[in-house]
Image (cartoon, rainbow, N blue to C red):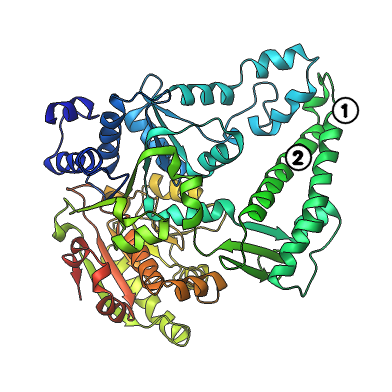
Amino acid sequence: MKQEIKSKFPYPTIRSQQLEAINFILDSVNKSNKKYIVIEAGTGVGKSAIGLTAARILSANSTKENSGAYFLTTQKILQEQYVKDFGGFKGPMKSIKSSSNYTCNFNKKSSCGESLRALKTAEKSSRFFKACAFNCIYKKSKEVFIAGSEGVTNFPYFLAETQYSGKLTPRDVLVIDEAHNVDNELSKFIEITISDKFCNSFLGMQIPRGLTQHQYVKWMTDDYLVKTSAKLSHLEKMMEKYVGLKEKIRSGEFASVAKKFEMLDKHVCKVRRFLELYNNQNWVMNDLPADSYSKTSRKLQFKPIDIAPYAEEMLYRFGETVIFMSATILDRDAFAESVGIPKSEMAFVSLPSPFPAENRPVIYAGVGKMNSSSIQDTLPKIVEAVKQIMKEHKNEKGIIHCHSYKVASYIKKNIRSSRILIHGSDNRDLILEKHKKAKSATVLLSPSMTEGVDLKGDLSRFQIICKVPYPYLGDKLVRKKMNKWRWWYPLQTAKTILQSVGRSVRSKDDSAATYILDADFERFYNSNRNLFPNTFKESLKL
C-alpha cells in the first residue's frame, strides 16, 4: 500500500503525517465502510495532496463509467491553485468555471455567457458558428473537464451544473476543500433575494408591503413567478428577431437584451428552486429597508436555517466517497449535524500543525471591550494600540482584521499613514494585489480577509484582530440558528478567529505574530476552550 500511495502522490517526497492521513482515509473507506471522511488539518500539512492521492487510489480500480474525482473549492483563487499545483495544460487536473469567465470568440467585448443565447438566433451566420459554436472556449473546457478523471471547480458552478444542466454525473470521490463553508455555500445557492430595484426595472412593480412570511411566499408563487416567467419569454422572443446576426450580434441593443435574459433566466431558476424547497419551519425571511448610504433598495431575503435536508441530494450523491478537508472543523459532532451527514457513516481525524509554536505567537492585549455599549470608548484605545504595533513592525508588512467596515473606517480616519491600504466591497482583490506588489511596508486594513488569502513570508509578519468576530445578532437568521443549535454561535466565532490567525504563517520557516485587542476575547476563550485546537492553545499568550 505504501508503494501505491507514493506512486499516486503528486510530489517526489511524502511526509509521515501525510502518509498516515492517506492510510486513515483508505482504511476508513475500505475496512470500516465509511462514506464521509473528515480531515481537520491546518496550513502546512498539505491537505490538497492528501485528498488528491486518496482520491486517485479509491478511483483507480473503479468500474464506473465516469470514474475519478471532483474537487470543490469555495473560491476561484483556490481553484486556480489546484490547477497550478496539479494540472496545467498537460496535467491531469482539469478546471472549469462559469461561462462568464470566458471571452466569446465572436464578440470579443462579451463573455461567453452573454453570447450563449445567440446560438439559437444565429443559424444563418456561418461566421458566428465558425468562431463560436464550433470553437467555443467554454464549451471545449467543459468537454475536457467532463472527460477528465480529476476536475476542480467552485461551489456555485458545480451546484448550478448538477442541479440545472445535468452534465456532471456522480464520480467515485468528491473532495470538498474549505469544508467549514459547506453550509454557507449550499445556503447561498438556494437562498433568494428580491429587491424593489429589480422588480421595478424588469416588471414595473414594487414588492407589496406588510405581508406575513407565508403571504409573501404565496405572492411569489401566484404573482411574482408568473410575471418574471412572462418577461423571460418576452426577452427570448426579442432575441429571436436577430436571425442571421451578422452585424447586430455586435450591437449594444442585442448585448443589452442578452444580458437581461441571462440575469432573469438565472433568477427565475432560483425562484423555482426556492419554491420547491420551501417549508415554513426551515426558512427565515428578512425584510430589509432601503439604505441611502449604500444606495440599496428595499429587499426581501429568504434563507434556510438548516441545509442538512438538502445536502445529500444537491451535493453528496455526486461522490461515492466524500472527503471533507478544513483547518477549522473544531467540533466533529456539530460539523456532522450542520452539514447533514450521519455520524455513523463518518470518520474523523485531526492533524497537528507542523509549524513551531514560537513562529506563530498569538498575543492577547485586551485594550478594551468592543461590544455595542463599549465600542465608542474603546475605539481610541484600539487606534493607539494599532499605532504602537505598527511602530514595532515599522519595516514589515501586516494585516489588520476589523470584521466591520465601521471599525475599518474609524482606524483609517484616525491613523493617517500611507502604509495603510483599505478596501471597499468592490476592490478587495485589487488592494490585495497592490499590497503584494508594494516595495514598502504596507498594512492591509480589512473587514473580510479572514480566509482564502495567502499572506506568506514577508507579505505579513504581524496581524491584528481588533474585535472578537461574533455573528451579528440583528440578523434574524443568526437568532434562528442560535435557537436551533446552542453550539452554533460560539462555534462560528471561534472558527472566524482561527481562520484569521491562519492567514500569515504558511510554511515551517515562516513566522508572524498575531495581536488580539478586544478585551472580551479572554472571557470567550475561557468559556469555549474546547473549541480551540491544541495548535492554537500552544501559541496563545494570555
Q: Which of marks 1 and 2 is nearer the N terminus?
A: 1
Image: 342 above or below 76 = below
Give the residue type that dot 2 points to: Phe
Where is residue 176? Give x, y as percent: 38, 44
Q: Position of residue 461 (x, y in %)?
A: 27, 56
Q: How crowded is mark 2: few (under 14 residues within 10 Å), some or many (20 or more)?
A: many
Q: What residue type is labelled 1?
A: Lys
Q: In the rendering, at what x and y percent does residue 180 appear?
A: 38, 55
For the C terminus, the quadrant is: bottom left
Residue 199 visible somewhere in the drawing: no
Q: Is residue 261 left or right of residue 460?
A: right
Label 1: how many residues lie within 10 Å, few (<14), some (14-19) or many (20+)?
few
Give me the C-alpha separation between circle 1 and circle 2.
14 Å
- Judging by the rendered image, the residue that carries numbered circle 2 is 261
Q: Indicate whether 335 appears above or below 99.
A: below
Query: Residue 88: image x %, image y %?
Result: 38, 25
User: Residue at image x 61%, y 38%?
Assistant: 164
The tally of labels here is: 2
- Identify whether 34 is placed above or below 417: above
